[in-house]
Amino acid sequence: MLLRGAGRFAGDVIRPGELHMRVVRSPIAHGRIRSLDVTPALLLDGVVAAWTHADIAELPAIGFRLTPLPDLLPYRQPVLARRIVRYVGEPVAVVFATSAYLAEDGAELVRLDLDPLPAHLDADAEPVAWVDAEQATWAAGLGRELPAQDSQATAFTVEYGDVDAAFAAPGPGYRVIESDARIGRHTGVPMECRGLAAVYDAAEQQLIVDGAAKVPFWNREAVAAMCGLPPRQVQVRETHVGGGFGPRGELYPEDVLVTLAAVRLRRPIKWIEDRQEHLMATNHSRGQHHRLRALVRADGVIEALDAAFVLDQGAYVRTHGATVASLTASMLPGPYRIPNFRVRAQVRLTHKTPAGTYRSPGRYEGTFARERLVDRIAGELGLDPVEVRERNFIPAEAMPYERPIQAMGTELVHDSGDYALLRAKVWEKFDLDGVRREVAARRAAGELAGFGFAFFVEKSGIGPYEGARISVDSSGAVTVTCGASSVGQGVDTVLAQVAAEVLGIAHDSIRVVRGRTDQFEYGRGAFATRLAVMAGSAVSNAAQALADKARRVAAHTLGVPEEDLGLAGGKVLVTGDPARALTFGEIARLLDPSGAAELKESPGLTADGWFHSDHMTYPYGLHAAVVRIDPGTGQTHVERFIVGYDVGRALNPTLVEGQIAGGVAQGLGGALYEEFRYAEDGTPLCTTFMDYLIPTALEIPPIETLITEDAPSPINPLGVKGAGEGGTTAVAAAVAAAVDDALGRPNAITSVPIHPAQIRGLLA
Amino acid sequence: MLLRGAGRFAGDVIRPGELHMRVVRSPIAHGRIRSLDVTPALLLDGVVAAWTHADIAELPAIGFRLTPLPDLLPYRQPVLARRIVRYVGEPVAVVFATSAYLAEDGAELVRLDLDPLPAHLDADAEPVAWVDAEQATWAAGLGRELPAQDSQATAFTVEYGDVDAAFAAPGPGYRVIESDARIGRHTGVPMECRGLAAVYDAAEQQLIVDGAAKVPFWNREAVAAMCGLPPRQVQVRETHVGGGFGPRGELYPEDVLVTLAAVRLRRPIKWIEDRQEHLMATNHSRGQHHRLRALVRADGVIEALDAAFVLDQGAYVRTHGATVASLTASMLPGPYRIPNFRVRAQVRLTHKTPAGTYRSPGRYEGTFARERLVDRIAGELGLDPVEVRERNFIPAEAMPYERPIQAMGTELVHDSGDYALLRAKVWEKFDLDGVRREVAARRAAGELAGFGFAFFVEKSGIGPYEGARISVDSSGAVTVTCGASSVGQGVDTVLAQVAAEVLGIAHDSIRVVRGRTDQFEYGRGAFATRLAVMAGSAVSNAAQALADKARRVAAHTLGVPEEDLGLAGGKVLVTGDPARALTFGEIARLLDPSGAAELKESPGLTADGWFHSDHMTYPYGLHAAVVRIDPGTGQTHVERFIVGYDVGRALNPTLVEGQIAGGVAQGLGGALYEEFRYAEDGTPLCTTFMDYLIPTALEIPPIETLITEDAPSPINPLGVKGAGEGGTTAVAAAVAAAVDDALGRPNAITSVPIHPAQIRGLLA
C-alpha cells in the first residue's frame, strides 16, 4: 500500500473546516516570563483562538508511561510553560487559525517578554537549583507540598555480588582497569516530522485523534484524562508514519493541545511539525557519560565492574521516566558473566530539549562503554580482544542464565544463546581473520585502515501482554485485529505471515487492523522490540484457536473426526480426500449467530488469542567494522559493516535485514555524524539538517549480515526474539574500535560521535 | 443529541473532494430505450463521470432481503434500466460532478430517446406480458434460461381448516356475507429524503458508506457483493435519519450506484434525494384490493373465511420480495378464531413505482378488510359490533394460541393476550358507551358525527437473533455496542434503559453504539417492530453477564461471597456495608489482560449477550375514532382518536406513546389523505406535497392512549412485545366505521383514502 502511494500520513487527514495549530516556543534556554500577550494574534483575521498556560491551567503536567519513579514527578513538563521557560523550543503559547500560514503569522504576533536566567548545560557539573517548591508541587500533582528540587532528578544503584569486597581483596595478578565513555546527544530523526489531526465528533460523542503511532492505547487513556473525557469517548487511530525510532508517538505537549482544542473549539485541528521544531521539540536522547572501573584477572576475565554514569535529561522528564537510565544500568553487563557488578545512575536536568528513548536506548550507550572497556582490557593485558570476550561470555551451557537484577521491571534471565558460536560463525562467514590481516597489511602500506568489533546483548518482547482477534467474513476473507502498533517496522506483514502459516493461506490475503483503539481494546505499543514476540505470539494463539474452531465445525458438518481434517487454501479439508471440504466462508456462514448457537460455538468464525509474558527475551549479536581514515580531513569512512545477529527465529528475513540495515545507519549517525550541540547560553546549534548531520546513502556501506536462529527463545511459541534494535546497539563500539585500530592507538576513542577535528588532533 | 442539533444526517457528511450524484430517470411509464448518450453531460465542466447500464453491465439485479420466493426472481430491478423502462422515475443513467448543481445540469444534458409502450396500471385486470425471456433470465440470475413472464409475479394460498367443506355444508341459520376492500397506494414519507455518502479509503482498504439505516449488516453484504469486495472491506454506518417507516434503508439502485462510484472513481460520492425523486423512486406501498366471503352463524361467529387479494407491486419486485402479501395473508384472521380459513394472494406488476413495506405492512391492509367485514356482519345480522368481535375473539384461556399457519417463516402462535379485557378497559376508561350515545345525539340533532372502532393483532420481535456487548472503560463509563439499528424510534434510549436497570446506573450515562458494521459483527435490522424484543433482550442478557462478571471479580477482591454483593451507583458493593465496594472503573482496571488472566476471566469488564427466537410475539389493540363530516365539502374531520394497546411491557411509556401518536398520524394519512394517483399513461400525479397530501398537526387530533401490560410476552426475558406499528394498524378500519356511522349508512366505506368527493356522492 505504501509502495502504491496509498498510505495515509497525518498530513493526509484533511477535514472540512479544520484549524491549524502553531506553537509559540521559547527563544531562550532559561528565563522568567515577564509578560505574555496573545491579543495581537487574536486580532489577525483567520486566527480563531490562542492560548497560554493560563488558558489550560487546569491541565496537569504530562505523566509517565514507563519507569515512573516518584523522584521524577517534580520534573514533569507542563503542556505550556508556566512562569519559567527551561529550553529553547519549549511551548509557551499556541495559536489556532484557518490555515497553517495564518497560524504561523499569528504565532509571530504573540508578545512574549522574558527575563533571561543563566543556562545550566553540563550534566557532569554539580547539581544546581532547578524547580522551586511551587513548581515542584504543581508538577508532581500529588496533592501535597513538595520542597524545591535540584537538577539531579534521581540517582539509583543496580548491583549484585560484592563489588567492594572484590576490589578490596583482589586475587594475585588481578589488575584494576578504568575507562571513560561519552555518548553524544542525538536522537531518532524520522523522515516525516510529527503530526496530529483531531476532531471532536459531536454526533458520535467521539474525540478522534489521527496520527499517533507507537502507544495509541496509552495515549488514548492519557488524552482522555487530559481532556476530561471517559476513555470510551476517545479514539486514537494510527496513521502511517515516516519512521518511529522511539521519540515518535509518545505523548507530547503538542498532542494534548491539538486534542484539547478539538474538544474545546469543536473544529477539526491539525498540527504538522516542521523540521526545525522537530529538532528542538521532539525527544533527544543518548547524552550520557560513563566511568567504569574493572577488576580483571591476568587472563582477561572480569571479576568485578564498578560503573557510574550521568544521563543528561534535558529540561524536563517526559513520558519515559527513568527508562533510559534503568536500561543502561541493567543491560550494562551484556554478554559477560561479571560476578560482581555495580552501576550508579544519575539522571540530571539541563536547559536543553528533554530526552527520551531512541532505538536501543541504554544499550547503545552501555555497549559503547562496556565494549570500549573490554578493548582496553585486551590492550592493557596484551590479549586478543576476541579471546577476552570469549573468556567472559556466559557459556551456552549456563542458559537460561539469570542475572540477579531487573530489566524493565522483569527478572533479567538470558533465555537462550550461544555467544561463542555466533562469534565463530561470523568470523568464518566473513573471514574476519583474513580481514584483520588485510587491514594490517594496508596499515603497513601507510593507509589509515582499521578493523574493530563489539559484542552485545539486546532485550526484546517486554510483556505483560498482547492480544489479537482473527475473523473470517462470509466470503472467507481473513482479518487480524490486534493491539499492535506500527512505526514502519513491517508489523502488518509479520503478523499476517504468522496467521497465514497457521491457517494455510497466503499472507497477502490477510488484512491486519491495528492501531485502532475502537477496534481492539488493549495494546501495549510498538517499543522495546516487543511486537514480533508479543503480538506475533498472540496472533499465533488466535490463529490456532480459529483453526480449532473451524475444524470443530467442519468435523460436525462433514461427519468426520477433527483429527482427519487439515487446513489449506482457505478450506478445511479431509486428509486424503480433499474434495470433501468446507471453505472458510462456508464455515463462517454456518457460524452465524443462529448456527453458532446450535453448534454451541460463539458466533462467527472468529477467535481471540492472548500472549502473556513476565520475562523478556534476549537476542544477541556482533558488529564489526572496517574503516579508513582520511589523513587530510580526519574523516572516518566506514568501508564495511558486518552484523551477526541471532534472533531466535526470523519470521521474515527480509524485514530482519531491513531492520538491521536501518539500525546500522542510525548507529553510524551517532558514531560519526549526529550531535545536538549547544552554545554557552543554551541556544541549540543544530536545528536544521545543515547542522545536524544525518548520514545519507553516501555514508552508509552495504550492510553485510548473518542472521542466525541458533537460540530460539524458549519463552514464546514462535521462538522469536526480535530484531528492531540490534542493528544499532554496538555500532559506536565497533566503529570506535576500528578507528583505534586505524590510528594504531589503542583506547584513543572514548567518545562518540568521532569528530574529524578530534582525529586530526590525534594524528597531529 | 438530536435536540441539541448535534445529530448527523447523510447530508452532514461532507468530505473534501466529494462528487455529487444525480440520477437521470425515465420520464415515461413504459418504453423502449432507442438511444441513450451521456456524452453531452461529460462535456460539461465539473462532470467527472456518467454511466448507463452498459457501464455497469456486470452488476446483477437487486436481490431480496425478505420472503425471496423463487417466482419473483425474473422481476428484480436492474440498477440502471436495461433496454426497457417500466415506471416514471426509473433510473436510466447517472452523472457524477463536483457539485450537486453541476450534477443536475449534467443529468439534464443526457440524451434519452424512448419509444413509448402502453402502460399497464390496473392490477385487478388480467395479467399481461411483462418481461421477455432475455430479461427474465438476466434478472433472475440463476444461470439458466427462463421463459417470458406475465405481470402476475406470484400467487399463493394460505389456509387451515376446510373452507370448502364449511361453505358446502353450512349449519342451520348460517349466512354467507361478502365484502370488498381497497387500500390506496401510499407510503412512508420521512421528513428527510434518502441520502448516502460513500468513500473508498485506500489507506484503510475500506469502503465506508454513511447514511443507510435499518438493515446495515444486510446492506453491507449486498454492497460488498455488488462492488466485488469481501465484506471485511465494507463498513456501513448509520447516520441519523428523519424517519424510517419501512421504505427507508432498503437497498435501492441509488445505493449501489453511490458505493460503486466510490470504489471506481476513488472520490467521495454523495447523493441526496430530492422530494420529487423520493415520491417517485422510494418504495410505495399498500395498494391492495381484497375480496372476502365469510360463513357466519346467526350469533355472528365466523365459521369460515374465504379471502383473496391482489397486491399492486409496481414495476419491479424489490428487496422485500413477497413480504407484504405474505404478512397480509397470515395476519388476516387477526384476533378471531375463524376455524376455517383460506386466503389467496396475487402479487402483480404494474407500470408504477415499485412497492415495498410500510409501517404495519399487510396488517393495515388486512385489518381494514377484516374489520370492515366484521362491521358488515354486525350490520347484516343486526348485532352490536362489540358483541360480534367478542364472540369471535380467541379467549384469554386459549393462550398461547397456535394458528396452524406461518408468519414471516415462523409458526404463528399468539403468545399471550386477553382481547376482551383490553376492549373492556378501553370502553371504561374512555366511556365509549357514553361517546356512542353522545354521537348518536349529535346525529339526531342533524350533525354528521360518527363513532367507529376496530380491533387488531400486531406481530413483533421477529428473530432469529440479536446480540449486544456491554463494556466498561477504565473510568467506569459504560458502552452498549450492538447490532441494532435506529430509524428514529428511540432505540438508543430503550437499550440504555434496559442495561441501566440491570446495572443499577443512570441510563443517560450509557453510550449506545449501533448501526456500525465495524463495531459489531451481526445485526438483523430495524424492521417489523423487532428491536425492543430482540435487541432489548440481548442487551438484558449482556447486562446480566456483565453484572455477574463484576460480582465475581468483586467477590474475589473484597473476599466476600458473590451473593452478598449488589450493584448500585456504578459500584459493586457489599449488601449492608456499602462502604466496602469497588467501582466499575476499578473492576475494569483489575480486568486488564494481565489481571484477567490471573482471575481466569476474559479481558476487560465486558460481556456479550445474545437473544435467539424462533417465534414472534403478538401485541394487540383497539382503535376508536369520532369523526364529523362537513356536509358541504364532504371532508371528514377526526375529532378524537383513541388507542388501546397491550405491549406486554412498556420499557419507556413516553416512547410508546410517541410511537403510537406517529403511527396514528400515518394511519390517518392513508385513511383520509395520502394516495399516489396515476394518469392513464402512467404519469404519476402526486410528485409534490401539493398533490400528495400528508396530514399535518392541523388534521391530527390529540391521540388518547391506554397502554396496558396485561399480557407480557412469555417468550422473552423482558416480557416486551413492541410498539412500533400498532398506532397505524387499525386506523383506516376505525375511521371507515366512524364515517359509516356518521353517514348513517352501514358498509358505505369499502376503500381508503376516503375522498371528500366520494362522501359528497354518498350524501347526494
Image (cartoon, coloured by chain):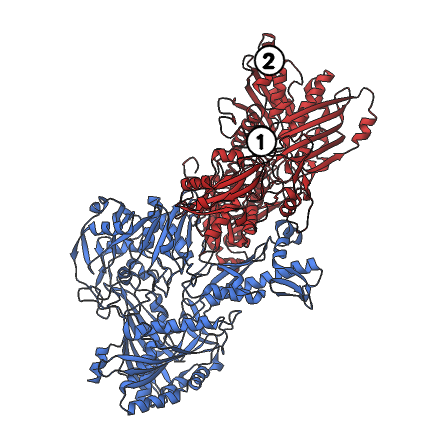
Chain colours: A red, B blue
User: Which sits in the foreground, B74 or B275?
Assistant: B275
Disc 2 secondary structure class: helix
Disc 1 secondary structure class: loop
Q: How many marks?
A: 2
Q: Can residue B679 be seen in the rendering of this structure? A: yes
Q: Disc 2: which chain?
A: A
Q: Disc 1: which chain?
A: A
Q: Can residue B722 be seen in the rendering of this structure? A: no
The quadrant in which residue B300 appears is bottom left
Crowdedness of circle 2 by 10 Å Cα count: few (<14), some, many (20+)? many
Say above or below: A59 vs A248: below
Horizontally, residue B148 falls left or right of residue B466, namely: left
* Residue A376 position in % (x across, y down): 70, 20
User: Which sits in the foreground, A44 or A96?
Assistant: A44
* Residue B350 position in % (x across, y down): 24, 64
| Circle number at residue A439 | 2
- Considering the image in quadrants, where does the N terminus of chain B appear? bottom left
* Residue A423 position in % (x across, y down): 65, 24
* Residue A402 position in % (x across, y down): 72, 36
The quadrant in which residue A285 appears is top right
* Residue farthest along the top direction in this orientation: A445
Q: Marks 1 and 2: which is nearer the front?
A: 1
- Residue annotated with mark 1: A682
